[in-house]
Image (tube, rainbow, N blue to C red):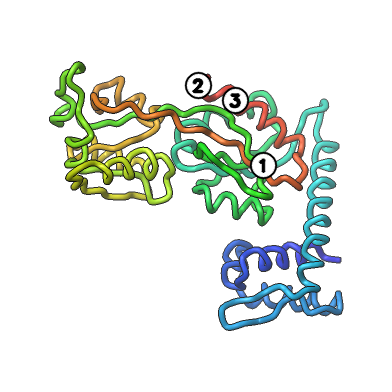
Amino acid sequence: MDTRLLRTFTTVARTGNLTAAAERLHLVQSTVTAQVQALEKELGLRLFDRLPRGVVLTDAGREVLGRAEAVLEAESRLRAVAASAAGTDGQVTGRVVLAAGETLVSARLPGVVAALRRSHPGIEVDMRTMGTSSAVAALRDGELDLALLLEDEAAFRDIECTPLAREPLVLVCSPEHPAARKAPDSPTAWAELAREDYFLHEQGCSYSDRFLERLLTAAPGAQPRITRFGSLEVARSCVAAGLGLSLLARANVADALATGRLAQVPGPQFPDVTVQLARHRRRWLSPAAAALTTELPHHFPH
Protein backbone atom coordinates (compact mmCIF):
# COMPACT_ATOMS: atom_id res chain seq x y z
CA MET A 1 0.00 0.00 0.00
CA ASP A 2 1.27 3.49 -0.89
CA THR A 3 1.71 5.31 2.41
CA ARG A 4 1.22 8.62 0.61
CA LEU A 5 -2.46 7.70 0.38
CA LEU A 6 -2.56 7.11 4.13
CA ARG A 7 -0.86 10.44 4.82
CA THR A 8 -3.36 12.24 2.63
CA PHE A 9 -6.25 10.41 4.30
CA THR A 10 -5.09 11.30 7.84
CA THR A 11 -4.56 14.94 6.88
CA VAL A 12 -8.06 15.20 5.40
CA ALA A 13 -9.46 13.50 8.50
CA ARG A 14 -7.75 15.98 10.81
CA THR A 15 -8.65 19.10 8.84
CA GLY A 16 -12.14 18.00 7.80
CA ASN A 17 -11.64 19.89 4.57
CA LEU A 18 -10.11 18.92 1.23
CA THR A 19 -8.87 22.42 0.47
CA ALA A 20 -7.16 22.80 3.86
CA ALA A 21 -5.61 19.34 3.49
CA ALA A 22 -4.30 20.22 0.04
CA GLU A 23 -2.64 23.37 1.45
CA ARG A 24 -0.93 21.43 4.24
CA LEU A 25 0.25 18.72 1.86
CA HIS A 26 1.31 21.23 -0.83
CA LEU A 27 -0.89 19.47 -3.37
CA VAL A 28 -3.73 20.60 -5.60
CA GLN A 29 -7.19 19.69 -4.34
CA SER A 30 -7.89 17.38 -7.27
CA THR A 31 -4.85 15.27 -6.31
CA VAL A 32 -6.05 15.02 -2.70
CA THR A 33 -9.50 13.93 -3.88
CA ALA A 34 -8.02 11.36 -6.24
CA GLN A 35 -5.77 9.91 -3.51
CA VAL A 36 -8.66 9.59 -1.06
CA GLN A 37 -10.75 7.87 -3.72
CA ALA A 38 -7.85 5.55 -4.57
CA LEU A 39 -7.54 4.53 -0.92
CA GLU A 40 -11.29 3.97 -0.62
CA LYS A 41 -11.20 1.79 -3.72
CA GLU A 42 -8.22 -0.20 -2.44
CA LEU A 43 -9.85 -0.80 0.96
CA GLY A 44 -13.36 -1.28 -0.40
CA LEU A 45 -14.70 1.23 2.14
CA ARG A 46 -16.24 4.68 2.07
CA LEU A 47 -14.03 6.65 4.45
CA PHE A 48 -15.76 10.05 4.30
CA ASP A 49 -19.22 11.46 3.91
CA ARG A 50 -19.02 14.47 1.58
CA LEU A 51 -21.08 17.37 2.96
CA PRO A 52 -21.44 20.99 1.78
CA ARG A 53 -19.37 22.23 4.73
CA GLY A 54 -16.59 19.68 4.28
CA VAL A 55 -15.96 15.98 4.83
CA VAL A 56 -16.80 13.85 7.88
CA LEU A 57 -15.35 10.46 8.75
CA THR A 58 -17.68 7.52 8.43
CA ASP A 59 -17.68 4.83 11.13
CA ALA A 60 -15.33 2.82 8.93
CA GLY A 61 -13.16 5.92 8.42
CA ARG A 62 -12.79 6.45 12.17
CA GLU A 63 -11.76 2.82 12.54
CA VAL A 64 -9.19 3.11 9.73
CA LEU A 65 -7.76 6.41 11.03
CA GLY A 66 -6.08 4.90 14.08
CA ARG A 67 -4.61 2.06 12.01
CA ALA A 68 -3.39 4.48 9.35
CA GLU A 69 -1.61 6.61 11.94
CA ALA A 70 0.06 3.51 13.34
CA VAL A 71 1.33 2.57 9.86
CA LEU A 72 2.70 6.09 9.31
CA GLU A 73 4.39 5.96 12.71
CA ALA A 74 6.00 2.65 11.81
CA GLU A 75 7.17 4.15 8.53
CA SER A 76 8.76 7.07 10.41
CA ARG A 77 10.62 4.67 12.70
CA LEU A 78 11.84 2.64 9.74
CA ARG A 79 13.12 5.75 7.97
CA ALA A 80 14.89 6.93 11.12
CA VAL A 81 16.57 3.56 11.59
CA ALA A 82 17.62 3.52 7.95
CA ALA A 83 18.96 7.08 8.18
CA SER A 84 20.95 6.27 11.31
CA ALA A 85 22.33 3.10 9.72
CA ALA A 86 23.50 5.15 6.77
CA GLY A 87 25.40 7.55 9.04
CA THR A 88 29.11 7.25 9.72
CA ASP A 89 31.04 6.68 12.96
CA GLY A 90 27.85 6.02 14.91
CA GLN A 91 26.67 9.61 14.41
CA VAL A 92 22.96 10.30 14.85
CA THR A 93 21.44 11.48 11.59
CA GLY A 94 17.99 12.45 10.43
CA ARG A 95 15.57 15.33 10.00
CA VAL A 96 13.61 16.99 12.80
CA VAL A 97 10.71 19.37 12.16
CA LEU A 98 10.44 21.86 15.03
CA ALA A 99 7.93 24.71 15.40
CA ALA A 100 7.85 27.68 17.75
CA GLY A 101 6.47 31.21 17.91
CA GLU A 102 8.52 34.06 16.47
CA THR A 103 9.67 35.03 19.98
CA LEU A 104 11.67 31.80 20.28
CA VAL A 105 12.47 31.28 16.59
CA SER A 106 14.30 34.61 16.47
CA ALA A 107 15.89 34.64 19.93
CA ARG A 108 16.66 31.05 20.90
CA LEU A 109 16.51 28.55 18.05
CA PRO A 110 19.40 29.81 15.88
CA GLY A 111 21.78 29.06 18.77
CA VAL A 112 20.20 25.64 19.26
CA VAL A 113 20.62 24.70 15.60
CA ALA A 114 24.20 26.01 15.47
CA ALA A 115 25.18 23.95 18.52
CA LEU A 116 23.47 20.86 17.15
CA ARG A 117 25.34 21.18 13.86
CA ARG A 118 28.61 21.11 15.77
CA SER A 119 27.70 18.11 17.94
CA HIS A 120 25.55 16.19 15.40
CA PRO A 121 26.35 17.39 11.86
CA GLY A 122 24.15 14.66 10.39
CA ILE A 123 20.96 16.12 11.90
CA GLU A 124 18.91 18.53 9.81
CA VAL A 125 16.50 20.83 11.70
CA ASP A 126 13.54 22.25 9.80
CA MET A 127 12.32 25.28 11.80
CA ARG A 128 8.79 26.60 11.34
CA THR A 129 7.13 29.65 12.89
CA MET A 130 3.74 28.80 14.42
CA GLY A 131 1.57 29.91 17.31
CA THR A 132 0.17 27.46 19.84
CA SER A 133 -3.04 26.46 18.05
CA SER A 134 -1.32 25.92 14.70
CA ALA A 135 1.54 23.97 16.28
CA VAL A 136 -0.81 21.66 18.20
CA ALA A 137 -2.80 20.99 15.02
CA ALA A 138 0.41 20.27 13.11
CA LEU A 139 1.61 17.87 15.82
CA ARG A 140 -1.69 16.01 15.57
CA ASP A 141 -1.40 15.83 11.79
CA GLY A 142 2.14 14.44 11.95
CA GLU A 143 3.63 17.53 10.29
CA LEU A 144 5.89 18.27 13.28
CA ASP A 145 8.14 16.23 15.52
CA LEU A 146 8.38 18.81 18.29
CA ALA A 147 7.02 22.24 19.16
CA LEU A 148 7.88 24.93 21.69
CA LEU A 149 4.86 26.68 23.20
CA LEU A 150 4.90 29.85 25.28
CA GLU A 151 2.11 28.80 27.61
CA ASP A 152 1.96 28.59 31.40
CA GLU A 153 -0.82 26.01 31.12
CA ALA A 154 -0.85 23.56 28.23
CA ALA A 155 -3.24 20.62 28.62
CA PHE A 156 -4.11 18.61 25.51
CA ARG A 157 -5.46 15.08 25.49
CA ASP A 158 -3.06 13.78 22.84
CA ILE A 159 -0.16 16.24 23.13
CA GLU A 160 2.44 15.80 25.87
CA CYS A 161 3.78 19.13 27.17
CA THR A 162 6.82 19.34 29.43
CA PRO A 163 7.94 22.64 31.03
CA LEU A 164 11.39 23.39 29.63
CA ALA A 165 12.30 26.87 30.84
CA ARG A 166 11.00 30.29 31.87
CA GLU A 167 11.27 33.23 29.49
CA PRO A 168 11.61 36.68 31.17
CA LEU A 169 9.39 39.50 29.87
CA VAL A 170 10.02 43.24 29.85
CA LEU A 171 7.87 46.31 29.13
CA VAL A 172 9.86 48.58 26.81
CA CYS A 173 9.68 52.01 25.23
CA SER A 174 11.95 54.50 23.47
CA PRO A 175 14.53 56.22 25.73
CA GLU A 176 12.87 59.53 24.75
CA HIS A 177 9.37 58.38 25.71
CA PRO A 178 7.94 60.03 28.88
CA ALA A 179 7.46 56.59 30.44
CA ALA A 180 11.24 56.02 30.35
CA ARG A 181 11.88 59.13 32.45
CA LYS A 182 9.88 57.97 35.47
CA ALA A 183 11.93 57.73 38.67
CA PRO A 184 12.56 54.16 39.88
CA ASP A 185 10.96 55.04 43.22
CA SER A 186 7.85 56.37 41.44
CA PRO A 187 7.06 53.74 38.79
CA THR A 188 4.32 54.08 36.22
CA ALA A 189 0.97 52.87 37.61
CA TRP A 190 -1.57 50.78 35.73
CA ALA A 191 -3.91 53.77 35.42
CA GLU A 192 -1.18 55.67 33.55
CA LEU A 193 -0.18 52.67 31.44
CA ALA A 194 -3.81 52.19 30.40
CA ARG A 195 -3.69 55.53 28.54
CA GLU A 196 -0.63 54.69 26.42
CA ASP A 197 -0.29 53.34 22.87
CA TYR A 198 0.91 49.75 22.47
CA PHE A 199 2.45 47.74 19.66
CA LEU A 200 2.03 44.04 20.36
CA HIS A 201 2.57 40.73 18.67
CA GLU A 202 -0.39 39.27 16.77
CA GLN A 203 -3.56 38.05 18.51
CA GLY A 204 -2.96 34.71 20.19
CA CYS A 205 0.44 35.66 21.63
CA SER A 206 -0.09 34.26 25.11
CA TYR A 207 1.92 36.75 27.11
CA SER A 208 0.59 39.81 25.24
CA ASP A 209 -3.00 38.61 25.67
CA ARG A 210 -2.84 37.44 29.26
CA PHE A 211 -0.19 39.56 30.95
CA LEU A 212 -0.78 42.91 29.29
CA GLU A 213 -3.98 43.40 27.29
CA ARG A 214 -6.30 41.94 29.95
CA LEU A 215 -4.65 43.93 32.72
CA LEU A 216 -4.69 47.14 30.70
CA THR A 217 -8.34 46.89 29.78
CA ALA A 218 -9.26 46.08 33.39
CA ALA A 219 -7.69 49.29 34.73
CA PRO A 220 -10.14 52.09 35.77
CA GLY A 221 -10.74 54.50 32.89
CA ALA A 222 -8.69 52.31 30.55
CA GLN A 223 -8.25 53.73 27.06
CA PRO A 224 -5.19 51.94 25.64
CA ARG A 225 -4.76 51.99 21.89
CA ILE A 226 -3.42 48.59 20.88
CA THR A 227 -2.00 47.78 17.46
CA ARG A 228 -1.17 44.17 16.60
CA PHE A 229 1.53 43.04 14.17
CA GLY A 230 2.46 39.65 12.78
CA SER A 231 6.13 40.59 13.10
CA LEU A 232 8.11 41.26 16.27
CA GLU A 233 10.56 43.38 14.28
CA VAL A 234 7.79 45.79 13.25
CA ALA A 235 6.61 46.10 16.86
CA ARG A 236 10.18 46.77 18.03
CA SER A 237 10.71 49.39 15.33
CA CYS A 238 7.52 51.26 16.25
CA VAL A 239 8.53 51.31 19.90
CA ALA A 240 12.09 52.44 19.10
CA ALA A 241 10.61 55.30 17.07
CA GLY A 242 8.83 56.55 20.18
CA LEU A 243 5.32 55.64 19.04
CA GLY A 244 4.37 53.59 22.09
CA LEU A 245 5.19 50.67 24.37
CA SER A 246 5.42 46.90 23.99
CA LEU A 247 5.72 43.82 26.18
CA LEU A 248 8.34 41.48 24.73
CA ALA A 249 10.59 38.64 25.79
CA ARG A 250 13.81 40.07 27.20
CA ALA A 251 15.78 37.85 24.80
CA ASN A 252 14.19 39.71 21.86
CA VAL A 253 15.26 43.16 23.10
CA ALA A 254 18.46 42.47 25.08
CA ASP A 255 20.74 44.06 22.45
CA ALA A 256 18.49 47.11 22.05
CA LEU A 257 18.39 47.62 25.83
CA ALA A 258 22.16 47.24 26.11
CA THR A 259 22.83 49.80 23.35
CA GLY A 260 20.20 52.27 24.54
CA ARG A 261 17.89 51.95 21.54
CA LEU A 262 15.14 50.82 23.93
CA ALA A 263 14.51 51.40 27.62
CA GLN A 264 12.68 49.39 30.25
CA VAL A 265 9.57 51.07 31.59
CA PRO A 266 9.70 51.55 35.38
CA GLY A 267 6.41 49.99 36.34
CA PRO A 268 4.66 46.72 37.13
CA GLN A 269 6.78 43.58 37.04
CA PHE A 270 5.56 40.82 34.76
CA PRO A 271 5.97 37.12 35.55
CA ASP A 272 8.15 34.99 33.33
CA VAL A 273 6.24 32.91 30.77
CA THR A 274 6.74 29.14 30.62
CA VAL A 275 8.33 27.48 27.59
CA GLN A 276 6.67 24.09 27.03
CA LEU A 277 8.23 21.33 24.91
CA ALA A 278 5.36 19.59 23.11
CA ARG A 279 5.18 16.30 21.23
CA HIS A 280 2.47 13.84 20.22
CA ARG A 281 1.93 11.24 22.93
CA ARG A 282 1.64 8.31 20.52
CA ARG A 283 4.47 9.17 18.17
CA TRP A 284 7.95 7.78 18.46
CA LEU A 285 10.78 10.13 19.39
CA SER A 286 13.50 9.54 16.80
CA PRO A 287 17.20 9.63 17.79
CA ALA A 288 17.54 12.95 15.97
CA ALA A 289 14.57 14.45 17.83
CA ALA A 290 15.94 13.08 21.11
CA ALA A 291 19.28 14.78 20.44
CA LEU A 292 17.50 18.08 19.79
CA THR A 293 15.48 17.65 22.99
CA THR A 294 18.71 17.19 24.94
CA GLU A 295 20.28 20.31 23.40
CA LEU A 296 17.34 22.68 23.93
CA PRO A 297 17.62 23.36 27.70
CA HIS A 298 21.19 24.67 27.31
CA HIS A 299 19.92 27.72 25.41
CA PHE A 300 17.41 29.07 27.93
CA PRO A 301 17.90 30.90 31.25
CA HIS A 302 17.87 28.67 34.33
Which residue is under mark 2? 301
* Three-letter amino acid code at the position of disc 2: Pro
Above or below residue 255? Residue 8 is: below
Looking at the image, tell me whether mark 1 or mark 3 is earlier in sequence order: 1
Residue at mark 2 to residue at mark 3: CA–CA distance: 8 Å
Q: Which of the two discs, 2 and 1, labels the residue nearer the N terminus?
A: 1
Residues marked 2 and 1 touching at CB (< 8 Å): no
Q: In this view, does 162 lie to the left or right of 210?
A: right
Residue 144 position within the rendered picture, expressed as x and y whole percent measured from the top left: 64, 48
Quick one: SS at disc 2? loop
Q: Which residue carries the number 3 mark?
A: 297
The number of numbered discs placed on residues in the rendered structure image is 3
x 67%, y 24%: residue? 119
Which residue lies under the disc numbered 1? 160
Q: Which residue is drawn at 60% across and 55% down?
A: 137
- The correct choice, above or below, for 67 with respect to 204 in the image is below
Residue ranking furthest to the top: 185
